[in-house]
Image (spheres, helix red, strand yellow):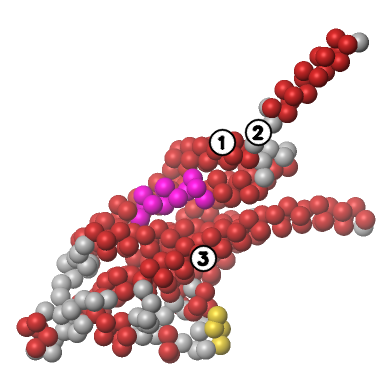
Amino acid sequence: MQAAMGTRNDVLPLTKERKASFITKLLVLIQRSSVNMHRDIGYYWLRFAVFTFCCFSIGTVFYNIGDMSLGNIQARISLIMCITTILAMASLGGFPSFEEEMKVFRKERLNGHYSATAFVIANTLSSAPFLMLMCIIPGAIVYYMTGLRRGIYHFIYFVAVLWTCTMQSEGLMMVVVAIVPDFLLDVAIGCGIQGLLLLSCGFFRLPDDLPKPVWKYPLYFISYHKYGIQGLYKNEFLGLAPDDQQSRNGLTMGGDHVLQKILQIDTGYSKWVDLAILCAMVVVCRATFLAMVKLTEMRGPIIKCGKMKL
């Protein structure tokens, strides 16, 4: 009897020790997601190739923009908007891979292998390096081909804004996938959301010209494109002075004048504030994704109970 009890006491601590902690599960999920993203060509590599080709094409169209003349200023403005738009639309190409990953998660979640929190954090951390790579190399191509503002710090800020915009766009698409598990509907809803945010970002219509109901309040202020392009505009134009000879001839204008008078951008706060707002939006969007995943989990048992009562 004592031998049996001793054997039982030996087994219980062993079972407790073998239970994986949250950190262990998180690390395993990060490793598995990273391997999956690396092996799946359609997850990031295909989008990386397409975005690189698009950036090279943009670089040839806007090659060596030149000075601060009126025509070149308009070219710089259009270039910045073009890059952010293409990068936002590139996130739509990840829907098939998002769908597959959510299917695997739902199946494993039913078995209780790990929590939704671990899944969301692991997905965010494992995708971040791939998105960074997708911004650095194509971003460097278009940045130096077009002759945007020189300086390593300006380039670092340029890449940082592209990266946070991509993270935000990807997060929005993940929220859509969590709510609507249908590929065609996901693409349609994703395009609609991106279109609304692009229309209200202050490029197609200047901020003061946007209709105040809906478009100005609240869409203009919740559009991440607004903070992305404003940060890039400040990075490009703020403090930029025209050439002395051309300034005397009235052929150019200063960067501050472009921001305040032409683009109607508030220069009272730094470009780093725009970047900080983008980072906060990324965190909020991922938290929303987590909330939608948990809500979907709760909705399943409620629907099943309702059917059983009927």
The foreground one among 85 and 244 is 244
User: What label does residue 179 carry, if any?
Assistant: none
User: What label does residue 28 carry, if any?
Assistant: 1
Secondary structure of the residue carrying tag 3 is helix
Q: Position of residue 80 (x, y in %)?
A: 32, 70
Instruction: List the residue tagged with mark 3.
Output: 281
Identify the image quadrant of residue 87: bottom left
Identify the image quadrant of residue 158: bottom left
Q: Residue at x 84, y 52 (%)?
A: 304
Q: CA distance from mark 1 to mark 2?
A: 10 Å
Q: Is residue 133 magenta?
A: yes
Question: What crowding class fits label 1: few (fewer than 14 Cα within 10 Å), some (14-19), or many (20 or more)?
Answer: some
Q: Earlier in the sequence, mark 2 or mark 3?
A: 2
Q: Amino acid at mark 1?
A: Val
Secondary structure of the residue carrying tag 2 is loop
Residue 66, above or below 305: below
Cβ atoms at labels 1 and 2 below 8 Å apart: yes
The image quadrant where one finds the C terminus is bottom right
Q: Amino acid at mark 2?
A: Ala
State the predominant SS element of the stretch in magenta: helix
Q: CA distance from mark 2 to mark 3?
A: 32 Å
Q: Is residue 26 magenta?
A: no
Cβ atoms at labels 2 and 3 below 8 Å apart: no
Residue 123, above or below 148: above
Q: Residue at x 49, y 53 (%)?
A: 94
Instruction: List the residue tagged with mark 2.
Output: 20
Q: Amino acid at mark 3?
A: Met
Q: CA distance from mark 3 to mark 1?
A: 27 Å
Q: Nearer the viewer, mark 1 or mark 2?
A: 2
